[in-house]
Image: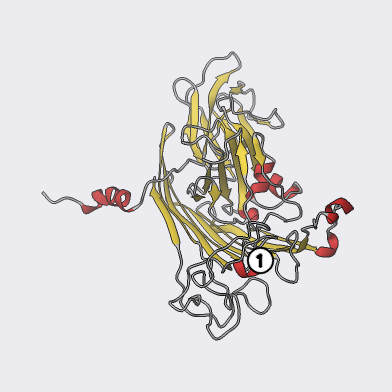
Amino acid sequence: MQRNPLIFLPLVLLVLCPLVGAQLTTGILDGVVRDAQGLILPGVTITLTGTGTLGERVSVTEVDGSYRFPNLEPGTYDMLFEMSGFASLRREGIVMRPQTTITVQITMEIATVAETITVTGESPIVDVKTTRVGGDFDSLALQDVPSATDMWAVLAASPGVRMTGFDVGGSHKSQQSGYESFGITSQNRIIKEGVNPTEGTGSAGGYWDYYNVSEYQVSAVGADVEMSTPGSNIVAIVKSGGNQFSTLTHLDYTSGGMVTDNIDDDLIARAGSTAPVLRFYEFHTDLGGPIMRDKGWFYGSYNRFYVDQAISGQDPEIGTDLGLFHTFSGKITFQLSDMDTFVGYSEWNRKQKPFRGLSLTVPPDSVGPQHAWHWLHKAEWQRVWSDRMFSKIMIGFFGYNFSQVYKQGTPRYDEVPPRIDTATEVSDSASAGDDVDEDGIPNWLDPDSNNDGIDDADDGTRDSDDDSPRKNHIATTAHVR
């Protein structure tokens, strides 16, 4: 008997791709339909439309009057209830969050004439089945509430989360901030588009585009069973486009002259100094819309931000905490049939810091320029088998390289062994990094040029004539769910 080789594909994928934690990012909408006397109504036709679904989904109440719409993407939904002999009823403005079960109970009146009753403006619907302590942040909250523009600003606004530092005018945007949830400082998990890009035990694998996220959900404690660790659970959902074309362009700018401080003479007498943001800007643009109305959507975005901050106790003429970041992303959603949907997402993120680690006790000769890439990709097939069952098969891939190199013109560490002055705690050693050739020269730098991997414009980009090969430390994770 000849076997179909495709039946072994799932097993092959499981062997090739290490299994790591993944999580559902969708919700469930359910309820019971009754008449004015409280009797259940089987056979009611329910039509669901909304910002999170391609086209419409149709269900019919069962013998006990219950209905259920599983696997709903975050968004706002409307429902139309129809049955012969009863007035049609439209329920509008139902907001679905990730990992949420929303129950909407419906009462239908006997029709005296052909009519449709529209219900709006009711009390907000609450998920009574959750035990989660945290916060939900949709695109309106993310864009209209003044805050820093990164994931850690969202964490700072979440109940149950305490930050170890606070972003002021972009001061923390170029490096991740620490945080704890009810005393737990690690074992956190970050989920983006269903993929787990957690780096280590709680860091985010990249510096994401704040404006391409349609919703963040933070669980400081009490997350659902898919959360296998006791720390914070952060879920991010990327925008998906829609049946109408839409775009967002955003620009922030801050210069040193727009920043003040509250330093006093006592701090100055103890050699204290301010660490103001010398220059900050962020540019974002995106475009989303239909490929084919009710059949296919697309979304693409680009984000660039630059932050240059003085370091307390360090002369800005010598070095600053400079960071430059770029993020490119794209997403497509196709409805393959009434039951099947395909979702694809890809993101690339680049981080550059020419003076990473520079401080009062670490001079410029002891730091290594950082040039890192992060990437995240997924392909997902969703199928709704019935009102009671759905499946998702997803291949997700996340990876990054962490490249810190020697500054050209500084000695190798084996020529100048690491040393710390115990009286002043000042480091006096060669810059860190091992992306070098046998002569100690960074592989991706031109050996004839006197530079540190940053172009002459001093904006964090590589030299334009630098096309030599590079050697990187690369870490990747992939999973099949």
User: Residue 38, can we see it?
Assistant: yes
Picture coordinates of residue 421 (x, y %)? Answer: 63, 60
Q: According to the image, what is the colour scheme of the structure?
A: secondary structure
Of all residues shown, which one is farthest toward the right?
Answer: 265
Q: Is residue 121 left or right of residue 83?
A: right
| Quarter that holds the C terminus | top left
Find residue 110 and report its image quarter.
top right
Callout count: 1
Q: Is residue 189 above or below residue 355?
A: above
Q: Is 109 situated left or right of 395 in this image?
A: right
Q: Is residue 352 above or below residue 81?
A: below
Q: Looking at the image, is 407 positioned above or below residue 205?
A: below
At horizontal 25% and vertical 52% (from top left) the residue drawn is 6
The residue tagged 1 is: 363
Q: Would you call the spot at circle 1 few (<14 residues within 10 Å), some (14-19), or many (20 or more)? A: many
Residue 93 shows in this picture: no
Q: Position of residue 240 (x, y in %)?
A: 56, 52
Question: Which amino acid is tagged 1?
Answer: Pro
* Identity of the residue furthest to the left in this view: 1
